[in-house]
Image (spheres, rainbow, N blue to C red):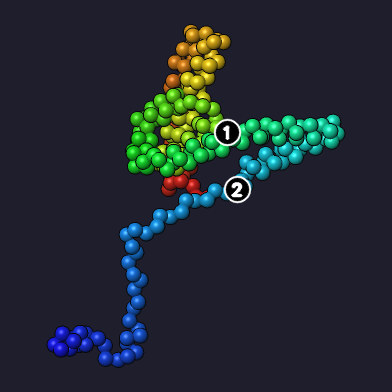
Amino acid sequence: MVGLSRVDSHLPSNPQALSELPITDPAPADDAEPKPRRARKPVGWSMIFIAVLVAVCAARVWRRDGIDGVLNILTHDLWLFGEIVPRVLAGCLLGGFIAEILPHDKVSRSLGPKSGLKGLLIGTAFGAILPGGPFTAYPVAAALLTVGADFGATIAMVVSWTLIGYGRAVAWELPILGTEFTLWRIVISLPIPVLAGWLGRVVFVRMYPKGEPSE
């Protein structure tokens, strides 16, 4: 009874005062669900530009060769599209799995904005040994950006894959152009990915000083 009297002494006697007491929201739970990823726009300026360019080219072909020329090109492109779709699907699945498997904290430390020259060198080395064609390289680059890599390290990876990638060197350059030409071409190209990654970081910081651009 003594405890109840103490509690009652702290409550206001006026009922109207009870209704005016501030209502506080409950504290958020520690295990709150993570924010959903930012959705990408299905139609962007690049897609609109390509659609306009395709329409202009189709009109020129129709004027020159008639409807038969347009249908011939469409038939050939449909076959090409059917051959490319499985590779695109495999590359997108690869990028999605990599984004889920790679530890974000380690990728951010190794390839993030604060990784410095080490991040650019790691991106360059990774791009040089990355196998496969564009259906592999670009989904992997997108996955690295998702898990914490910055623009500079990702640019270094893509430029290195383009210039130093061993796959094309072994399959095409060595048999056709010879060992001496291939080695000198690789040696001369070595600093270019690092320089491109550094310039990418400088441009990104100047254009977006507050972080990633909002879509």
Tally of numbered discs: 2
Q: Name the residue under label 2.
A: 42
Does the image show residue 142? no
What number is the disc on residue 141?
A: none
Q: Quadrant of residue 74?
A: top right
- Residue in the picture at 52% in, 51% down: 39
Q: x and y percent of residue 157 in the render?
A: 45, 30
128 up-or-down from 91: above or below: above
Secondary element at image label 1:
helix
Q: x and y percent of residue 7 in the render?
A: 20, 84
158 up-or-down from 32: above or below: above
- Residue in the picture at 49% in, 51% down: 38
Residue type of the residue flagged with mark 1? Arg
Secondary element at image label 2:
loop
Does the image show residue 39? yes
Which one is closest to the eye, mark 2 or mark 1?
Answer: 1
Circle 1 Cα neighbour tier, 10 Å, few/some/many (<14 / 14–19 / ≥20): some
- Between residues 166 and 122, which one lies in front from this camera angle? 166
Q: x and y percent of residue 158 in the render?
A: 49, 30
Residue type of the residue flagged with mark 2? Pro
Label 2, label 1: how far apart the Cα atoms are: 20 Å
- Between residues 25 and 120, which one lies in front from this camera angle? 25
Q: x and y percent of residue 172 in the render?
A: 55, 15
- Residue in the picture at 37% in, 59% down: 32
What number is the disc on residue 87?
A: 1
In the picture as drawn, the residue positioned furthest to the left comes out as: 2
- Between residues 114 and 162, which one lies in front from this camera angle? 162
- Residue in the picture at 34% in, 64% down: 28
In this rendering, position of residue 99 left or right of residue 168: left
Q: Indicate which disc, 2 or 1, sits on the residue closer to the N terminus.
A: 2
